[in-house]
Image (spheres, rainbow, N blue to C red):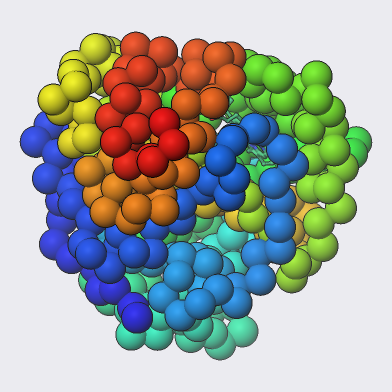
Amino acid sequence: MRISPKPVQSFRDDFTYTNSREAISRFPFPFVEDEYRYSVNIEPHAMSGPDGSVFEKFLDIDEHYLSEMAERAIVLKENPARCLSMKHMDLACWDMIERVMSALSADYPEHFSLTKQGDNWHWHNKLLDIQEDFVFGDSSTLPMSPLEYIGRQVQGDFAILDQRNADLFMDAGIVTCPADWSLAFDAGMSFSEWHGPVPMAREEGIFERALKYLTAIQVGRPVRRLNWTLTINARMDTSPETYPSWGNERTSVTPENVAEKVHLRVEVQVLDRMPRSNALMFSIRTYLISLEDLVTNPQWAKRMHRAMKTLPAPLVEYKGLTRFHPMVVEYLSQFDPVN
Ligand code: HEM
């Protein structure tokens, strides 16, 4: 089953975003046990998921494509610094262009096509009605930087990590829908520095083991992990830069509106080694589902109740759930026979 992009819906103001029945059924529900703890939850991104699953293709294009691209354009207009690239990352950004264009045209030929004659490339994005003739590796032949050009045409945030001294550095990225972190703030930081605010994981040795794993990733062997949080309203852009427009929404949750307002926000994060630059491309593909839609699956509702009920206090606080977490647990308890 392949879902076609639907007309633009909004992730702000009137929040017209909705998930179709198909989108709900393929939602990447993240809880594999009744208790959630941080772990080195990295696995091969084998692209062998069942037909129609979000893991079927290297990059998942779904019914929200046009909406997410419209939202990205709004955010970049408000703040162009959501797309940053240091000079030494030029080659890595061209690596990304090749990876994304090749994957999209191979996996979704009805929407995208790429033709190459040596370094003269032709790109056609039928969904956004974009056609471009450009010279691979020559940024002056694109209407904007390579990173912004491709970032405006693919769902998900991207960080491009330079690898040196057995460490990773956040030296480029396009990040318009982060779960409360800032690319401009983290730019140039190392793996351990940008993970500085995360509780519990460092003491448990999770970051040390993850970094060893990541620096050894080879070309053609992408891996993935899931992360999650809860977001009020279907808001994609929960960045520190725009905190004044969403921070106080956390106080708007009541027992009456909790199912409609609180959304489970899941990030499918894929890491892929770039062949020319040796950089790592880190994509963060965000999926949102309201609790109301989530509980249409009884297994998810029951498990989510247990995972929320037993969530360690430092995680509740770090993820910004403190004000409404008890209401979420209370609401979900009706779907769990053992509560
Ligand atoms: C959180 C980036 C890989 C585990 C974060 C944050 C960022 C980030 C920016 C938010 C930190 C903040 O509060 O300011 C990245 C990038 C990665 C990467 C660019 C690619 C190299 C990993 C891996 C793990 C991991 C492989 C696996 C163990 C975590 C955890 C959190 C986190 C547990 C806390 C998330 C939460 O509770 O919501 N990451 N990360 N990260 N990261 Fe990573």
Q: Is residue 273 left or right of residue 266?
A: right
Which quarter of the frame holds ligand 1? Answer: top right
Residue 260: x %, y % from top left: 18, 36
Which of 31 and 101 lies nearest the eye of the viewer? 31
* Residue 101: percent from left, percent from top: 50, 71
Outermost residue toward the right? 165
Q: Is residue 68 visible?
A: no
Nearest the viewer among 317 and 128 is 317
Nearest the camera: 270 or 41? Answer: 41
Q: Where 162 sits versus 141, above or below?
A: above
Residue at the (67%, 24%) spot, across then down = 195
Residue visible at 26% across and 54% down?
296
Q: Residue at x 28, y 17 (%)?
A: 250
Residue 171 lies left or right of residue 304; in this view the side is right
What residue sits 36% from the left and 18% below the top? 326
> Compared to 136, does 176 lie above or below?
above
Q: Is residue 268 visible?
A: yes
| Image spot of residue 109 (x, y percent) | 40, 85
